[in-house]
Amino acid sequence: MDKIYSFYKDRSVIITGGLGFIGSSLAIRLTEVGARVTIVDSLISQYGGNMFNVEPIKDSVKINIMDIRDRHGMNNLVRGQDIMFNLAAQASHIGSMEDPFADLAINVQGQLSVLEACRENNPDIKIIFTSTRQIYGRPQYLPVDEDHPLRPTDVNGINKIAGEQYHILYRNAYGIETVILRLTNTYGPRLLVKHNRQGFLGWFLRLLLEGKEITIFGDGCRLRDLNYVDDVVDALLLSGYKKEAAGQVMNLGNHESISLLEIVKTMIEVNKSGKYNFMPFPDGIKKIDIGDSYADFSKAKNILGWEPKTSFKDGLLKTMEYYRKYGKDYYWH
Amino acid sequence: MDKIYSFYKDRSVIITGGLGFIGSSLAIRLTEVGARVTIVDSLISQYGGNMFNVEPIKDSVKINIMDIRDRHGMNNLVRGQDIMFNLAAQASHIGSMEDPFADLAINVQGQLSVLEACRENNPDIKIIFTSTRQIYGRPQYLPVDEDHPLRPTDVNGINKIAGEQYHILYRNAYGIETVILRLTNTYGPRLLVKHNRQGFLGWFLRLLLEGKEITIFGDGCRLRDLNYVDDVVDALLLSGYKKEAAGQVMNLGNHESISLLEIVKTMIEVNKSGKYNFMPFPDGIKKIDIGDSYADFSKAKNILGWEPKTSFKDGLLKTMEYYRKYGKDYYWH
């Protein structure tokens, strides 16, 4: 990664959603290698933004609290930036069903605001946009590759597709370089653990660390692929660096898929204690459940030279260590 | 169609965009067969809504001027309705590039507002949503069937996809019966002819009738399929009537595709006079041009028993007759 790190040295980088889980992890790495980092985050209370996430770099980055829907603000912030990592999002699937207008405002209108700001003020910027495997819906085949039909089962999936397509359109029509990464479940230090509305992993982790029993919906046989956050940060950095990435849509994923039950068992093993039980799917969650899902990431491997390096056990160890130390800054923030 | 007409007799039908070209044509037919018709239309000045469109039925229908984004209004209007023809839209492709936020507000947020109103107040309603072949983008093969990848070349295409997917989602998650028709170029009496931002056909027609020269962008070889509005109204009525239509996405189209130049020549022939010239594509239009495009409508044929019946010449004759009579009510309104 040395060549990549020196590429980012002194480069001006803006990260939307930069106080969130993945955004802050990326901001920390970029700051370590000498990039000039500007963070934009709205700190909406139920989302993943948390000032504590950037504690190690808080004096070295520019933090701009602002909603990406703020067009005048975006117009100003994008000027002079070389690269944007566009991570700001509403990321709760069940939340998108309960308040579809909020999801629409952030994941569609917000993205249009970002892209219009770039078109008008900085069309030479390169944008890396994070999307989600949720847009595929219930897989028709596995592993899911990028050509899989898009059949989202929730409002969030529909809106993330529009977000992707805007990025592709602004490249084709206006020449703004854009890269799209479709992320799978990501975990690691700084993962949101304050509620159970944004993925099961953070919530399971918290229950475990608080000595509470984990409840698995369904029979626990659902297969997933998981990425440790440092591996995802690698993929983001590679996407900004590699010329060949421009215009591409690429899945992230893992070599192995793992069942929910295995995930919980591994967590308990790493934690050296813990309990779990089963419960039928609540109706609202069953409606948007996608069944087994794991991704074919060979395109990212070919184009970026990327593959995940961290084993689930190693990743879990580091994650648990982090929350044992700093849990109080996450459980209620 | 007799069985279908008696199905609609005394049925409560709401038409969004019901003062527009296709909406008003549908409202007239439904009123003729005894349906109870409520029209919702925002009459936004640059769009296709025009009070003169419903002149023949103005005393027999309920006309409610309102934007579909008005959630409280929609909540009230959908109650007690059996069928909704959901036609309200921003339909200018170039307009969607110039003001993407307006297109988003109407074609995405507006659709969510309609669907949420139905979910909360009338989940037993059946909704027929009109989409566009524009969502396919530049065809990868011809004729374009419903499985063709969706690669829109403009903001309107992206937003119409989201509108479609919301309709599919609200069926899967909440059981609201929805049908999606992907329309191609439609023409006929009541077509918008006041500006050239909403399809070439209306504009060519107006130039011809005003004795002005028609300008064709490019070489005129672009192939299109065209539907006369009465045939499209047939397809809409069949979609609301046929149980098998529920949950389906279907193209409309025509048996024959025709080049832009042939279209213009036929128009001149029917009009018995007229001139045309060629001009290179303006940049903004070239960016979103989709090349040749015509649709495979065999799915609609199988499921609805629909096919277009009106020849282009016959359709043109009726259209020109209409505008010769009523042109003054369309050129500036």
Image (tube, coloured by chain):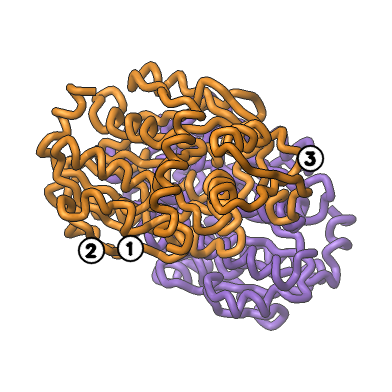
Chain colours: A purple, B orange
Q: Out of B174 and A143, give the one closest to the viewer.
A: B174
Secondary structure beneath disc 2?
helix
- Residue at image point 31% right, 47% down: B24
Q: Is residue A222 visible?
A: no
Q: Is residue A75 visible?
A: yes
Tell me where residue B101 appears, x and y as whole percent: 52, 64
Q: Residue flagged by tag 2: what amino acid is it? A: Gly
Q: Residue flagged by tag 3: what amino acid is it? A: Ile
- Circle 3 crowding by C-alpha within 10 Å: few under 14, some 14–19, many from 20: some
Report the number of discs: 3
- Identify whether A106 is placed above or below B173: below
Residue A276 falls in image quadrant: top left
Q: For the N terminus of chain B, which image quadrant?
A: top left
- Residue at image point 24% right, 58% down: B74
- Identify whether A185 is placed above or below B298: below
Q: Chain of mark 2?
A: B
Locate residue A72 relative to residue A242 in the image: left or right.
left
Tell me where residue B298 appears, x and y as whole percent: 46, 19
- Residue at image point 67% right, 79% down: A76
Secondary structure beneath disc 1?
loop
Residue at numbered disc 3: A303
Instruction: Determine which of the numbered discs, if any, sits on residue B73 in the image.
Output: 2
Locate residue B77 relative to residue A298 in the image: left or right.
left
Residue at numbered disc 1: B67
Tell me where residue B177 appears, x and y as whole percent: 26, 36
Foreground disc of the pair 1, 3: 1
User: Are callouts 2 and 1 both on one chain?
Assistant: yes
Q: Chain of mark 3?
A: A
Query: Do callouts 2 and 1 mark residues in contact (Cβ within 8 Å)?
Result: yes
Q: CA distance from mark 1 to mark 3?
A: 46 Å
